[in-house]
């Protein structure tokens, strides 16, 4: 692949080539569908959103699960897409989608390289948010994910709540 973004079919093929389990691929497709709906609403509100980047990022956000089911799957996934020549903007979506973002302090705790692991661009935020709204291939209320995270990691729950509020306000809901 070259530095252009992959089509939906190419992204799914890349997931398969990397031996992502079928349930991960179904999850990624559901996240992509929701992310594109959100992105379209934001575009309709006059915001500039790269729809192709959102779709590719959502489809490939969990490609790292082919090698890791830990919190580092975002970091692993970013390395995979860069290794096949895909754009840095795509790798950033993958690297920054986990848990509504990973703080610098958390990244240090995990022993990760110094970098930004919190979604910054609109495309990164849309994919991270859509990911939190899909469970077992189905859309779920964001409150379910926030409640689940609250039991394990209150800071992550708060980041997801803030992301939800930001996306909701941008959509005009």
Image (cartoon, grey):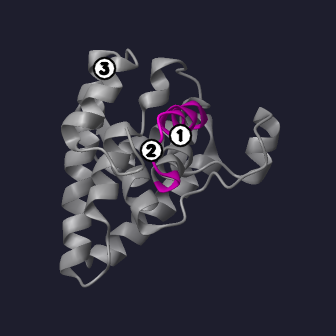
Q: Position of residue 43 (x, y in %)?
A: 23, 75
Please say if 173 is above or below 5.
below
Magenta stretch holds residue 79 = yes
* Residue 138 visible in this rendered orientation of the protein: no
Q: Toward which corner of the image does residue 46 lie, by quadrant? A: bottom left
SS assignment at label 3: helix
**Mark 2 and mark 1 in contact (Cβ < 8 Å)?**
yes
Q: Toward which corner of the image does residue 25 lie, by quadrant? A: top left
Estimate how packed mark 1 is, as few (under 14), some (14 to 19) or many (20 or more) residues with alpha carbons within 10 Å: some
Which residue in the structure is indicated by mark 1? 82
Of the image marks 3 and 1, the number of the one nearer the N terminus: 3
Magenta segment boundaries in residue numbering: 75-89
Q: Quadrant of the C terminus?
A: bottom left
Q: Residue at x 26, y 65 (%)?
A: 39
Magenta stretch holds residue 137 = no
Q: Quadrant of the N terminus?
A: top left
Q: Nearer the viewer, mark 2 or mark 3?
A: 2
Which residue in the structure is indicated by mark 2? 86
Q: Residue at x 33, y 69 (%)?
A: 168
State the separation of the CA atoms marked 1 and 2.
5 Å
State the separation of the CA atoms marked 2 and 3.
16 Å
**Mark 3 and mark 2 in contact (Cβ < 8 Å)?**
no
Estimate how packed mark 3 is, as few (under 14), some (14 to 19) or many (20 or more) residues with alpha carbons within 10 Å: some
Residue 29's label in the rendered image is: none
Which residue in the structure is indicated by mark 3? 16
Please say if 157 is above or below 37.
above
Q: Residue at x 47, y 34 (%)?
A: 84
């Amino acid at each position: 692949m070259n530095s252009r973004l992959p089509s939906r079919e190419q992204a799914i093929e890349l997931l398969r080539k990397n031996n992502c389990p079928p349930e991960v691929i179904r999850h990624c497709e559901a996240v992509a569908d929701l992310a594109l709906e959100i992105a379209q609403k934001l575009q309709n509100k006059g915001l500039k959103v790269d729809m192709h980047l959102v779709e590719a990022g959502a489809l490939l956000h969990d490609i790292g699960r082919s090698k890791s089911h830990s919190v580092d799957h975002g970091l692993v996934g970013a390395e995979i897409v860069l290794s096949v020549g895909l754009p840095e903007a795509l790798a950033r979506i993958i690297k920054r989608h986990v848990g509504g973002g990973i703080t610098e302090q958390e990244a240090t705790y995990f022993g990760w390289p110094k970098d930004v692991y919190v979604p910054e661009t609109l495309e990164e935020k849309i994919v991270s948010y859509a990911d939190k709204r899909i469970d077992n291939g189905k859309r779920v209320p964001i409150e379910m994910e926030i409640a689940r995270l609250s039991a394990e990691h209150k800071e992550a729950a708060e980041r997801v709540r803030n992301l939800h509020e930001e996306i909701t306000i941008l959509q005009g809901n």
